[in-house]
Amino acid sequence: MREQSERLGRDPVPSLLVSLAVPATVGMLVMALHSVIDTIYIARGVGTVGVAAVAISFPVQLFFLALAGALGIGGGSVISRSLGADDPDKANRAFGNILSMIIIVSLIGAFLGLAYLTPMLKLFGASKTIMPYAIDYLGIILYGTISFAFGFSINNIVRAEGNARVAMLTMIMSSVLNILFTPLFMFALNMGIKGAAYGTVAAQGITAVYLLVYFFSGKSSLSIRLLYLTPDFALIKEIMAVGASAFARQGSASVMLIIANNMLIYYGGDLAIAVLGIIHRVMMFTLMPILGVVQGMLPLVGFNYGAGKKIRVNESIILSLKVSTMISCAAFLLVMAIPGALMRVFTTDPEAIAMGQSALRIMFALSMTVGVQMITGGVFQALGKGKEAFIMSLARQVIFLIPLLLLLPVLFGLTGVWIAFPLAEMFSFLLALCLIKRHRDYFFSDKLSRVKLCSETSSAANS
């Protein structure tokens, strides 16, 4: 199956980006859709307190996503560059080490999470009203940690070897199964919020089995062997050096949400937490296509960088920047135009709708800059430049947003929480521009190079 990787260095860049990014985007949108539908089920079946409970529990899920993302994206970068440099042995060893780390990290994380469930939820801002619902939900989710982490990590690996179609199918499978299982457990079996958790765990488990079948069937460029599962600490260090940026981005999002939830409880109560939970779903659905573009760009940039094809690297980055900026501008226009309608998709509570539509407009005020930020961070991940990727991952959530969340509510109350988000976007965008300028050789090619690329693309298309 080497052919699916080799085409990353041979086929025209625009068609490759489309073939990689569109399946990723479709998969991401379906995942976002299932999150939206889950929230609707919970809002209608349990009420606003159920939505708040899921929002309180979400930092834990984000933390495990961060660990899985660190392994999947860091390992995917190593695998893409290894395949591009014609080193399949290193690619397979990286894959095996990722599998070993997934098992170890998941088991430890689930054990600690279950052991300290109640104090952890108190730290996250759960009130007495929210606490029993959060315990019911998160207590079940933690049992599915290993399949959840496996599916999220290995999906990135499948995409890294150039098989975007299978990566898309796994995301669609997981989401569709979740959409089907959740109402079955919640309403048909009358399990309430526990049903939403059981639906998620069951869907992730089936998806993990499907991915295992894919690798054992020989359809992948990679293979699972006991020899490759043996820890290679030099390789693990390389994986985590790049993956640290993904962990920092999503791990810091978990910390940010803990701080935001505590501020919201103090200045706005349970309703404000539910509103942020709904807004987070809107963010996922409107901005998830950008993540799809990033996921499509990563193997394309990584493979060609490993193969020494700088011109194709430049073209891939520029095209990704253009597409992601168009998507983020479209998301901005949508939210500015119909914030109330977006809130009414999730809830019929008039107070939540009134608070949410105002918060949506404030939080999305500078969302048109998100594309540049995400692509810039993704570029450094693909190139294996862990330091720059790490800085970009920390920028929005840790360097800018967390200090703003601690300061602005003191000055402006609940409105200060909402204002912190666009201000963090602005500062992160400026930082991205500075990093692009400093590393302009990776982002931009000269005129002669672009002419040469056009000639190569035309020749490839004719052949």
Image: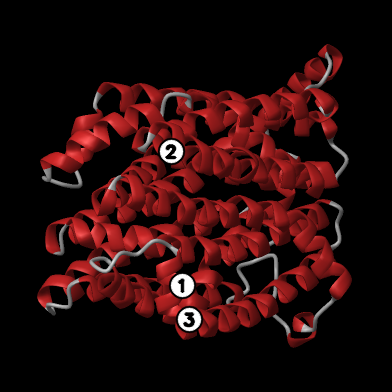
- Location of residue 1 in the rendering, given as x and y in whole percent from the top left corner: 68, 62
Q: Which residue is mark 3?
A: 116
Q: Amino acid at mark 2?
A: Pro
Please provide percent x and percent y for residue 349.
12, 45
Three-letter amino acid code at the position of disc 3 = Tyr
Numbered badge on residue 120: 1
* N-term mark: 1 or 2: 1
Q: Are marks 1 and 2 in contact (CB under 8 Å)?
A: no
Q: Secondary structure at mark 1?
A: helix
Residue 412 or residue 434, whichever sits in front:
412
Q: Which residue is mark 2?
A: 409
Q: Is residue 315 above or below residue 61?
A: above
Q: Quadrant of the C terminus?
A: top right
Badge 3: how crowded within 10 Å, few (<14), some, or many (20+)?
A: few
Look at label 1 and name its amino acid. Met
Question: Does residue 279 show up?
Answer: yes
Question: Do the numbered discs 3 and 1 sit on residues whose CB atoms are within 8 Å?
Answer: yes
In the rendered structure, the answer to whether residue 73 lies left or right of residue 190 reads right
Crowd around label 2: few <14 · some 14–19 · many ≥20 (10 Å): many
Q: Nearer the viewer, residue 78 or 65?
A: 65
Query: Is disc 2 placed on a helix, strand or loop?
Result: helix
Residue at point 69%, 65% (across, down) = 221
**Distance from Cα at disc 3 to Cα at disc 2:** 29 Å
The vertical placement of 25 against 354, above or below, is below
* Residue 2 in view of the camera: no
